[in-house]
Image: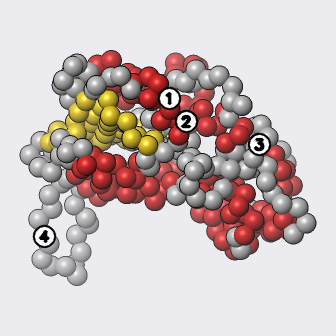
Amino acid sequence: MAKGHEHEPVLHGPVLDALRIRADGIYVDGTYGRGGHSTAMLARLGEEGRLVVTDRDPQAIADARAKFADDGRVTIRRANFAEIGSIIDELGLSGRVDGLLLDVGVSSPQLDDPDRGFSFQHDGPLDMRMDPDSGESAAEWLARADESDIARVIREYGEERFARRIARAVVRTRETTPIERTAQLAAIVSEAVPGPPSPRHPATRTFQALRIFINDELGALERALDDGIDLLAPGGRFVVISFHSLEDRLVKRRFAKAARPPPASRRLPTVEPFVARLNLVGGLVRADEDELVRNPRARSARMRVAEKPAGEAA
């Protein structure tokens, strides 16, 4: 059973500043979580405003319905944010969205619930699915995956230099004992990683990698970034919060590709005129010291903002 958790949204003030919410605007929170950002956005919307919230987690959607089912300004959909393009199109809002927010990665309530299997801090079933009603769990995948595939996932998504050692230890263990608990996997990784004790738990990168892979988080983010621009109204803002380098690198590159012309090439003497689909707004935003005191988990949060040019139609 999850403990009660008073959720504080990360980068609360900077998000609201970046979105520049108008009372009559249309906004999308593609990663509802426990509604911290949505609640703040609604507080600035008037009767004519509209907010669309999505999340793949059934507990998040239950929370949204409990809070906002009677608010006619709010539309709630249970879906992966990779589907945001089709959802907004279905609602007839493509090209009319004034602000789109994605707060990607695992939420604090998911981390704090041992039954979800995202964290090694408390023992629980090795699940890691953001949508527990679809796909296979981390335990199921680890039980069938080749050693080379396990090593690749841990290396690519966790940037773990001991990925091969960890994969070998996983395969060796599962030959005699199913790996079904978070504490069990954390112990296997800790034993496989050499070197002196570190402030960071040895299993941190492996758990990150498995979570990203099991939920196809980078693939979902790519699709949302590609589709999100078309959803925006001219002048609309695209705000993305990420929590590790792989996500942030992807956001930075996608935003830059839409905002800046590609480097010139002597092999291509005739270059098509470049039309920016986004303008970059400011640089990387991190939590300030006051927020870090209140919410240490904000330490790894990174926010990037882009805006659709005023003359750019959908």
Instruction: Give the labeled residue for mark 2.
Output: 59
Q: Residue at x 58, y 20 (%)?
A: 6
Residue 206 in the image: x percent, y percent? 69, 54
Measured in 3D between alpha carbons, the distance from the residue under mark 4 to the one under mark 2, in whole angstroms, is: 48 Å
Q: In the rendered structure, are the residues bearing label 1 and label 4 in contact, judged by CB atoms less than 8 Å apart?
A: no
SS under mark 4: loop
Q: Which label was assigned to residue 124? A: 3
Front tag of 4 and 3: 3
Q: Residues within 10 Å of mark 4 (few under 14, many from 20)?
A: few
Q: Which residue occupies the foreground of this view, 245 or 232?
A: 232
SS under mark 2: helix
Measured in 3D between alpha carbons, the distance from the residue under mark 2 to the one under mark 1, in whole angstroms, is: 6 Å
Q: In the rendered structure, are the residues bearing label 1 and label 3 in contact, judged by CB atoms less than 8 Å apart?
A: no
Instruction: Give the labeled residue for mark 4.
Output: 272
The numbered mark, 3 or 2, whose residue comes first in the sequence reads 2
SS under mark 3: loop
Measured in 3D between alpha carbons, the distance from the residue under mark 3 to the one under mark 2, in whole angstroms, is: 18 Å
Instruction: Give the labeled residue for mark 1.
Output: 63
Residue 238 in the image: x percent, y percent? 30, 41
Q: In the rendered structure, are the residues bearing label 2 and label 1 in contact, judged by CB atoms less than 8 Å apart?
A: yes
Give the quarter of the image for residue 68: top left
Q: Residue furthest right?
A: 176
Measured in 3D between alpha carbons, the distance from the residue under mark 1 to the one under mark 4, in whole angstroms, is: 48 Å
The numbered mark, 1 or 4, whose residue comes first in the sequence reads 1
Measured in 3D between alpha carbons, the distance from the residue under mark 1 to the one under mark 3, in whole angstroms, is: 23 Å
SS under mark 1: helix
